[in-house]
Amino acid sequence: MNKAVIWIIVGAALWGTIGWFVKNLYMYGFTPMEVVTLRVTSTAILLVSYVLYHSPKALKLHSFSDVKYFIGTGIFSIIFFNYCMFMAIDLSTIPIATALLYTAPAFVTILSFFLFKETFTSRKVLSLMGTIAGTSFVVGLLPSNLSAIPYQSILFGVGSGIGYALYSIFSKYALTKYTSLSITAFTFIIATVTLLPFFPYSENLTILTEPAVLFYAFGLGLFPTAIAYIVYTHGLKKTEASKASILSTIEPVVATFIGILVFHESFTFVQMLGMALIISSVILMQTNPRKSLQT
């Protein structure tokens, strides 16, 4: 397993910890979109502070027209997929919304075929089918009565998958000129500038000064966001976007374990089957049939 793959898996695993921070912030009365605003803002503060201290040149645009890449990652990906996902949750359930979010690898694979001319191999198709089926089992979408799911939630859920997929696509373009650190920093700066004007400061000012809230807000910005996106984007530099997206489905596995160990959520045989499918798909994506024949 090469280093790029390890970076991608580490980033995805860190994404899987987001539920712990979010659930604790919900306990203080924040709405989903307010939590998104706290997430992108704390991330932007942490990243800009780090970059200004260690590598200020990373915040320099090569060309003003390059802002289009970060509008793509910041607005069309980060903000859009969060909004769609929260709407899907509101209209249905968290498991269904999460499963629909992980239609993202399918969109990345299809878009990468047309945009980056990445090969559409049978191995990749099998891995893709395995991750989609495995994720559906892990979050409880399958087995289920699909006719009972409101069609609006499916539309928003698929929209979240498209938005999630767009981060890999826009980042792939940006990586031709910028480092993973620069891309992550610009992404969350754009997202913060977009969301902050709509945050209800007067209603939440007192709560925001509480140490526990600051801990969860900046923890959310540091571990499952800043560090996660930096290492994922770094791994994406030497990995096909479609492969990286499939590898990132290790996130629901981590999220499920956190739910079991921290929040004492149930763990069924179907979830175990789903995890096995995801892990098997990741291993399948990494095996090289030619090498196997040579050894």
Image (spheres, rainbow, N blue to C red):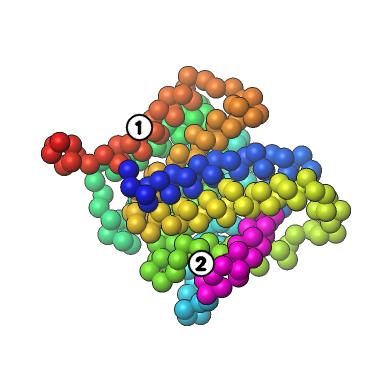
Q: Residue furthest top?
A: 269
Q: Secondary structure at mark 1?
A: helix
> Overall secondary structure of the magenta stretch?
helix
Nearest the eye: 107 or 229: 229
Is-magenta flag for residue 45? yes
Q: Within 10 Å of the Cα at label 2, are there few (<14), some (14-19), or many (20+) other Cα atoms?
A: many
148 w.r.t. 228: above or below: above
Residue at 52% from the left image edge and 35% from the top image edge? 254
Q: Position of residue 12 (x, y in %)?
A: 48, 45
Decide which of tag 1 and tag 2 comes sooner along the chain: 2
Q: Is residue 154 visible?
A: no
286 w.r.t. 214: above or below: above
Q: Is residue 28 visible?
A: yes
Q: Secondary structure at mark 2?
A: helix
Residue designated by label 1:
280
Nearest the eye: 246 or 210: 210
Asked whether, in this view, residue 204 is left or right of residue 54, the answer is right
Residue at 34% from the left image edge and 54% from the top image edge? 239
Residue bounds of the magenta highlight: 35-59
Give the quadrant of the C terminus: top left
Residue designated by label 2:
182
Asked whether, in this view, residue 179 is left or right of residue 89, the answer is left
Q: Nearer the viewer, mark 1 or mark 2?
A: 2
Residue at 64% from the left image edge and 65% from the top image edge? 49
Asked whether, in this view, residue 5 is left or right of residue 263, the answer is left
Do the residues under discs 1 and 2 have CB atoms within 8 angstroms? no
Q: Which residue type carries mark 2? A: Ser
